[in-house]
Image: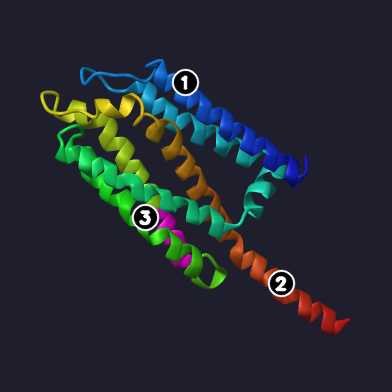
Amino acid sequence: MSGREYGKLAIGIIAGWFVFSLSAGAAHVFKQSAAGPPIALGLSVAIPILLFWIWFRTSAGFRDFALSLDPRVLTTVQSWRIAGFVFVVLYFYRILPGMFANPAGWGDIAIGLTAPWVAMKLAEPGHRKGFIFWNALGLLDLVVAVTTGTTSGLVNPHGLGADAMTVLPLSIVPTFLVPLFGILHIIVIAQARRWPEVERARNRQPVAASAA
């Protein structure tokens, strides 16, 4: 498959994934009370990332396509995470527990606010370490959000749980946005790890040309 074909396939998968997430949320597939761990919600986060990783590792064509994407664009997409302020607001109104809402909300706000600057200033070989570090923080924020969201009811069974995250409209966040943002982080980290090899290859070209 060509890069264009992989692009169309990826867009189709993402669109179908979004429709499934929306439909399943409307059908209360992910709905869970505080009485038990939200297993369906946890799987909806883990399975897309796992499937992407398997595809990325086993298909050279798809891997080349993913690594050819513009890291600045993929990083700028993370700006949407500034919407995490909604979690903080919902905590204020006692709809979400502070154990989840505060780290998830403020972490998303921090990543969303800094994403444009990181895309412009750090998404290049000269700032490779800083770029990878920022993306690692972005991934950590997602891991913390998922962990606190799925365990808040277990840690404090008589307190406020994150039940609101298992129904629409908030269920879109863990079932679609969180794994999507996580996949974007994984792609750009993989790109950044290859930058030294790309730079060495580029530096060898002028030398080879002058020698010829």
Residue 131 within the magenta-colored segment of the rendering? yes
Identify residue for label 3: 111
Judged left or right of residue 29, residue 155 is left
Q: Which three-letter amino acid code belongs to the residue tagged 1?
A: Ser
Q: What x and y, as percent, mark residue 210? A: 83, 84
Magenta span of residues = 128-136
The image shows residue 190, relative to residue 86, as above or below, that is below
Question: Which of the two marks, 1 or 2, is nearer to us in this view?
Answer: 1
Residues at marks 1 and 2 touching, judged by CB atoms closer than 8 Å: no
As drawn, the label of residue 23 is 1
> Mark 3 falls on what kind of element?
helix
> Mark 2 falls on what kind of element?
helix
Q: Is there any visible trace of residue 104 in the rendered image?
A: no
Judged left or right of residue 207, residue 181 is left
Q: Nearer the viewer, residue 44 or 105?
A: 105
Q: Could you give the CA–CA distance between mark 2 and mark 3, rounded to whole angstroms? A: 32 Å
Q: What x and y, as percent, mark residue 171? A: 37, 29
Q: Which three-letter amino acid code belongs to the residue tagged 3?
A: Ile
**Is the magenta region chiefly helix, strand or loop?**
helix
Q: Quadrant of the C terminus?
A: bottom right
Question: Which of the two marks, 1 or 3, is nearer to us in this view?
Answer: 1
